[in-house]
Amino acid sequence: MLIVGVVFALAIIAYLALQSFVSTKIQDAIKQDLGEKVIINYKDIKVNLFTSQVSLHDVHVLLKDADTPNHEFAITKIAVKGLSYFQLLNSGAIEISNVVIENIKSTIYFNKEQSSNKTNIKTTIEKAIKINNLDINNAFFTIKTSKQDSTFCQVDNFTLKIKNFSLTNDVIASQIPFLFDSFALKTGNVFLVMNEFENINIASIALDNDLTIQNFLLKTKFTKKLLSQKITTERDYIDLKIPLINASNFNFKGPENNFHLEALTVLFENFNLDIYRNKLEADDVTIKQFFSKKLKQLSFPIHFPSIKITNGLVKYSELVTEQAVPGEIVFTELNSEILNVSNKASEPIIFTNTAKLMGAAPIKVDWTFYTENEVDLFKASGVIKNFETTAINSFLEPNLRAKAKGTINELYFTFSGDSYVSNGDMKMKYQDFEFLILKKDRLGVSKILTAIGNLFTNDGSNTDDNGYRYGAISVNRDATKSFFNYLWINVQDGIISTLTGNGKKDKRD
């Protein structure tokens, strides 16, 4: 019995010694692998050799930075299960079956003026780390600017699950500084300062194989009046609401662990966009690039074969005089698809759009960007039918000091060009149509009013057998205006030509 007692006591001593040794090794690994700028303190560490479990309680992580306040993380518990003692004792490498991190509350400081290649954390590690299942539960992140100490980003109730997470010196310097097989996350509310003027709010984000965003809101942070007081050139007031965004087969990890974005399809349901512009402000004369060129200039690959908007509403209004009510154009029942949104492939980017103009007249407008050229070649076409022109007087009267009467039964246009010039054709069928100028002392002169102000109701002359009048389109682009302005002045030029010309089809057609 004495011998058994001695052996049992020796076994307990050996176990306690080994447990103390393993605990020391873990603590040393934490200190050595993370470097001098990362300090981890914890209230308690527990090691159980029989169950291969290690847990740290009441953990506080401090990331030291000379240029900003320290970044802090408070963690209720870090639980490790299935720690490989053999690897830890033999090579020092850390191999773990499961890690669960509970209840993170963090404050991170972000200085946009600092160099983008500067890092606060050691870019090498002493030993490789591999975790079969890494879970983060109930995390709250707040990112603040270092100067004003104001919130730049906030994420509530963040949950993350990563399978086969690994961290090695080979990948730690990559754009995505770790490897993984699968990745899933969920969040509660997300707030992000987009820029000086707009904020983003999101009710929730879920990412597994698909990405789902609920109640996306991008909105100017100031009222329309206050925005005008803060700007020196024209800037849109924006209110964008999207109840549901879904990206199927979403992926952000590219070759060599570099960041990229791709999804098989992206869907925006019940898209609702309200834009207001104060035209009394000075023009923004910066050069406006086409969408296709902006896409090429992205610093990371992007590939979305299909992006769809369903049941959308777009409202655009302008204020042109202090006394006038802002004029408004509305597109309802908007359904759009954009094909080949990619800077990895050479296929043309194709936009197809259908809607109801002013909630009544069916309208279809398509355009295509050809990406494999330096002058931004494009083509556009469209059709409007059964348009009672009085519906647009709420926009024409305050903005063009005019009003319309009559019906445009059909309007077709096609034009093509580049970032400098465009040419095309238009045909119209209309009845009892006229444009009336309201005032001679208007602010600025509208080309369309000057050209068609004296036209009277169409008497049916100069039409073909089907009742169409024809016109030509020839436009020089103002590069300080957007592509949508370019679309509009092409249509405007075609309307002027159709209504004021001889109405005959070009013989070349």
Image: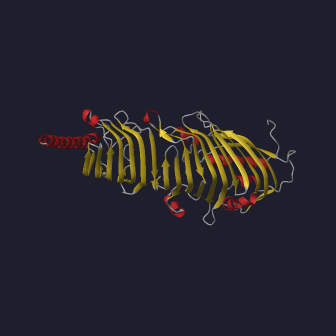
The image quadrant where one finds the N terminus is top left
x then y, percent, for residue 20: 20, 43
Give above or below for 29 relative to 201: above
Q: How many marks?
A: 0
> In the displayed image of the protein, which residue is found farthest to the front?
1
x then y, percent, for residue 24: 21, 42
Q: Is residue 112 visible?
A: no
The image quadrant where one finds the C terminus is top right
x then y, percent, for residue 109: 35, 51
Q: Residue at x 60, y 65 (%)?
A: 322
> In the displayed image of the protein, which residue is found farthest to the bottom?
323
Between 54 and 469, which is closer to the camera in this rendering? 54
In this picture, residue 144 sits left or right of residue 428: left
Between 176 and 236, which is closer to the camera in this rendering? 176
Q: Residue at x 18, y 41 (%)?
A: 11
In this picture, residue 401 sits left or right of residue 105: right
Between 332 and 44, which is closer to the camera in this rendering? 44
Could you say which quadrant of the image residue 51 lies in? top left
Q: Residue at x 81, y 52 (%)?
A: 430
Between 372 and 27, which is closer to the camera in this rendering? 27
In this picture, residue 466 sits left or right of residue 393: right
User: How is the structure coloured here?
Assistant: secondary structure
x then y, percent, for residue 237: 55, 57
Give above or below for 32 relative to 144: above
In this picture, residue 8 sits left or right of residue 143: left
Could you say which quadrant of the image residue 427 lies in? top right
Q: Is residue 482 visible?
A: yes
